[in-house]
Image: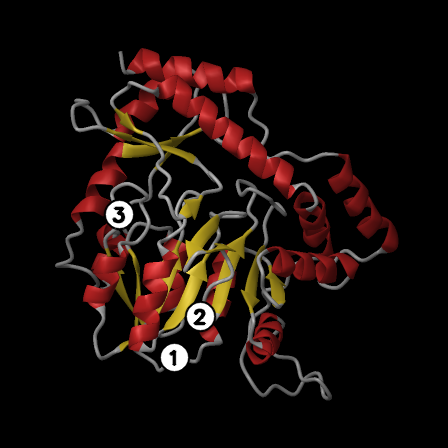
Amino acid sequence: MIPVNEPRLGPRELDYVRDCIESGWISSAGKYIDRFEAGWAAYCGRRYGVAVCNGTVALELAVSVLDLPPGSEVILPSFTIVSCLEAVLRNGLTPVLVDCDPKTYCMDVTEVERAISPRTRAVMAVHIYGHPVDMERLLVVVQKHGLKLIEDAAEVHGAECRVHGTWRRCGSFGEVSAFSFYANKNITCGEGGMVLTDDERLAERLRSRRNLCFGRRDRFLHEDRGWNFRMTNIQAAIGCAQLEQIEQFLQRKLEMARRYSEGLRGLPLQLPVTREWARPSVWMYAVLLEDSVPFDAAELARRLYAEGIETRPFFRGMHEQPVYRRMGLFRDVRLPVTERISRRGLYLPSGQAITDEQIDRVIEAVRKVLA
């Protein structure tokens, strides 16, 4: 079985983890945490990085420090992972969902502007499968309406977006940006996340809230509420080793995508696109069945699994999730692009450790089952 994702870990990661164990710095303090925070922030063009235990809590923490009034509306795409919606709900805010672009699968900026109401206070930009949101257009919208911008950059490590003629790395936009370093990301800590910001005050609040808001002078005197969202030094050590290799990893992802695109050309599939204002990082190689194919992505996945190929389905839109319908949310929401692609899309094995021979086997299998 060719796995849908497998990370690349080597001697550098092992050396750094061994150093943690031998030094005794295995918990939530240590030199690797400081190094990883500073290194990732600098790589993304930010001033401050605050490491946390995973990407889900990175989003929740990021939203919390904006102090949006209870019930405020936050616009975000329906086509995303559940973490994004939960970050809004768990902060006492109201999610407003919009449809996505049918080619990039990122939020449709035109729909974002249409969704703005007097209660809107923020937009969460979610980059999807390695391709950026159209940040130039989105920045115009949020600035025009005086909204906060939360950037979910979990899936775009190393990707760039052109804004007013200048290329900027994803993760450098908005008041706060959040990352995941889960095992399937372009660089990984196994689990892990980080919030980036250029605002010193927000950075201090992020650090305090990730650490239960312990007092500076009197440790057990609390002026605010927080969480235990800390990253361990061991996680950060792996992250440091991975960050040192990121350009190599990104180049491999681009090579993987080129090989897939050449091998799958001519099939009834929509292959990944690149807008002229984007430099994607190809987190996952995502394909979409054209309407001429008489079966859906679930059937394609079953056929590929029988050939020894593991895949993953596209996100199912947040507006179709039973748990939120039971809460009375999104009952009358219909988002046709999200609904279509969630049923006809999946991504192929795309991990850092995939070999050219494995890619060729996947291509052969896809061609066979679509013949």
Is the residue 290 above or below the residue 284 in the image?
above
Residue at the disc numbered 1: 68
Which x, y percent locates residue 253? 53, 33
In the image, is 205 to the left or to the right of 143? right
In the image, is 286 to the left or to the right of 236? left
CA–CA distance in space, label 3 to label 1: 28 Å
Kind of residue at badge 1: Leu
Residue at the disc numbered 3: 101
Which x, y percent locates residue 349? 46, 28
Question: Residue at coordinates 32% horizontally, 22% vertically from top-left?
Answer: 302
Q: Which quadrant holds the C terminus?
A: top left
Viewer-proximal residue among 33 and 327: 33
CA–CA distance in space, label 3 to label 2: 25 Å
In the image, is 356 to the left or to the right of 296? right
Mark 2 crowd level (few <14, some 14–19, many ≥20, 10 Å Cα): many
Of all residues, the one furthest to the left in this rendering is 332
Circle 3 sits in a helix, a strand or a loop, which is it? Answer: loop
Kind of residue at badge 3: Asp
Residue 63: numbered disc: 2
Kind of residue at badge 2: Val
Mark nearer the N terminus (3 vs 1): 1
Question: Residue at coordinates 33% horizontally, 67% vertically from top-left?
Answer: 140
Is the residue 369 above or below the residue 105 in the image?
above
Of all residues, the one furthest to the front in this rendering is 165
Quadrant hosting residue 249: top right
